[in-house]
Image: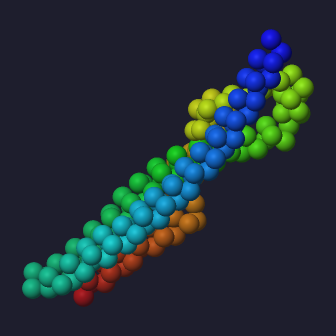
């Protein structure tokens, strides 16, 4: 019976290692996705402004202001992906806390995981916790400096250009 318990514990540790690797892989994939979202935002935004300015025979310049919506939409999409990423990062934080806790040491003594659930890459078991809610709050995520200034800057440029073309 004791051998079965040790084998089960060893299997759980292997699952924990795989969960760490898989979670880190997903975090990196989301980094790639969010970079792609930024690239598409620039492409669509720039293309829209260029198209409006090129079609000068129709005097569409005053509509440049509406291109401010484009980065705002991409901002929300980027934020949603970053929210998924924040869940994964929160899970890695939980794993780190567990690995550095007394529960982890006790787990080896008892050959079973103590106070830790496996296979919860998005930290769903923590959804009720205040820290989890704060870490994955979409409003907080949308205000990350890395995206706030990028998408907000694009929208601001659209507004400035739009106001300029409306006045002139």
Q: Can you say which quadrant of the picture contains the C terminus?
A: bottom left
Determine the residue positioned at 84% across, 28% down: 107
| 47 displayed left or right of 12 | left
Q: Residue furthest bottom?
A: 168
Residue at (86%, 22%) from the top-left corner?
110
- Evaluate whether residue 134 shows in this view: no
Q: Residue at x 59, y 45 (%)?
A: 22
The answer to which quarter of the image holds residue 161 is bottom left
| Rendering coords of residue 138 (x, y %) | 52, 48
Q: Is residue 14 above or below residue 72?
A: above
The number of callouts visible is 0
User: Residue 16, relative to residue 45: is it above or below?
Assistant: above
Quick check: 56 above or below 83? below
Left or right of 9? Residue 21 is left
Quarter-of-image position of residue 114: top right
Residue 103 in percent (x, y) is at 85, 30
Tell which of 74 and 90 is nearer to you: 90
Q: Residue furthest left?
A: 57
Q: Classify residue 57 by image quadrant.
A: bottom left
Residue displayed at 58% across by 65% down: 145
Quadrant where the image shows the N terminus:
top right
Q: Nearer the viewer, residue 33 or 78?
A: 33
Provide residue 137's location: percent of width, then percent of height. 57, 45
Given residues 142 and 25, the one toward you in this image is 25
Q: Is residue 167 toward the left or the right of residue 73 in the image?
A: left
Q: Is residue 147 visible?
A: yes
Location of residue 59 with respect to 75 vertically, above or below? below
Colouring of the image: rainbow
Horizontal side, residue 126 vs residue 44: left or right: right
Image coordinates of residue 44 in percent, x first then y, are 30, 70
């Amino acid at each position: 019976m004791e051998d079965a318990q040790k084998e089960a514990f060893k299997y759980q540790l292997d699952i924990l290692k795989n969960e760490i690797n898989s979670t880190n892989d997903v975090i990196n994939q989301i980094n790639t996705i969010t970079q792609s979202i930024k690239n598409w935002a620039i492409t669509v935004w720039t293309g829209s402004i260029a198209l409006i300015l090129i079609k000068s025979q129709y005097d569409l310049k005053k509509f440049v202001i509406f291109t401010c919506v484009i980065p705002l939409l991409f901002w929300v999409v980027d934020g949603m992906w970053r929210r998924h990423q924040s869940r994964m990062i929160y899970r890695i934080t939980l794993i780190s806390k567990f690995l550095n806790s007394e529960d982890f040491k006790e787990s080896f003594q008892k050959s079973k995981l103590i106070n830790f659930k496996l296979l919860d890459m998005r930290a769903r078991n923590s959804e009720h916790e205040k820290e989890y809610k704060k870490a994955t709050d979409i409003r907080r995520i949308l205000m990350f400096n890395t995206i706030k200034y990028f998408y907000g800057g694009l929208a601001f440029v659209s507004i400035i250009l739009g106001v300029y073309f409306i006045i002139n």
